[in-house]
Image (cartoon, helix red, strand yellow):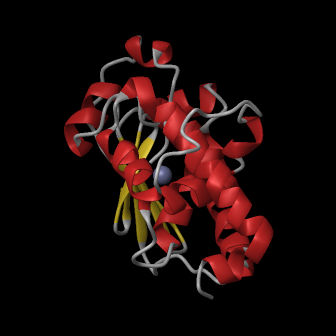
Amino acid sequence: MRRWALLVLLAGAFPSAGTAAEVRRGHLSVAYTDTRDRAELSAVFLAWQGAVRDLRAIGLSVPAAVRIEAASSAATFAARTGEPAGIAASTRGRVIHTQRLSALGARGLLSVTVRHEAFHTAQPAGLARWLAEGLARIFSGEARSDPPTPTGLEGVPDAVLSAQLLLRDPARLGAAYHEATRRARVLLAKRGWRVVLGR
Ligand SMILES: [Zn+2]
């Protein structure tokens, strides 16, 4: 999951045409209902291929069959996932639920969202929540734009940080993601991807 701060675009989302389409390439299938999403498919598959290659380089592999289900609107996404509308995507096992692809694309978030969720499909079982989110944000490239300022959560125990990420309180979620990423970055600098991932 990742935070998606800007929701303005979604407020103007058109209603879905209601007809689901599905496209499969290799081990990934993408289902969508809004016809505007068709134009984003090649970017989705390209980002996925890049993620699969980069995951392999750090000892991880995605499951044999993964499905992306793109919602037609923020409301549909929230109803499907139970997540706040401000989340870009949510992965459960081999299924990645996302916001409307064209809305993610318009915000420049499509590629990083696909990479972030690809990491979640491939991450080792039992990875602490804070570490999974921090690593996913570093792997996706989202962390590059994190502010270098203190997060204010430096003294919070790891377990409490994980709990804050699960609580999804919009007022505190951004800082929690940044702090998880800061800690993950420290670990990676010391030990490297393969040791941190137990590979
Ligand atoms: Zn995540």
Horizontally, residue 28 falls left or right of residue 17, namely right
Horizontally, residue 147 falls left or right of residue 123, namely right
Q: Depth check: 85 or 23 in front?
A: 85
Looking at the image, residue 54 lies above or below residue 18: below
Q: Which residue is pictured at 52% across the width and 20% down the height?
A: 6
**So how many labels did they put on this image?**
0
Q: Depth check: 155 or 108 in front?
A: 155
Q: Position of residue 182 (x, y in %)?
A: 66, 49
Quadrant in the picture for the C terminus? bottom right
Looking at the image, residue 163 lies above or below residue 152: below
Q: Which residue is pictured at 41% across the width and 23% down the height?
A: 171
Q: Which residue is pictured at 30% across the width and 20% down the height?
A: 15
Looking at the image, residue 119 lies above or below residue 42: below
Q: Residue furthest bottom?
A: 199
Whether residue 47 is visible, yes or no, is no
Q: Position of residue 198 (x, y in %)?
A: 59, 85
Q: Position of residue 65 (x, y in %)?
A: 42, 75
Q: Which residue is pictured at 68% across the width and 54% down the height?
A: 138
Write down the quadrant of residue 66 in the picture: bottom left
Write down the quadrant of residue 39 in the picture: top right
Whether residue 187 is visible, yes or no, is yes
Q: Position of residue 5 (x, y in %)?
A: 51, 24
Horizontally, residue 175 falls left or right of residue 171, namely right
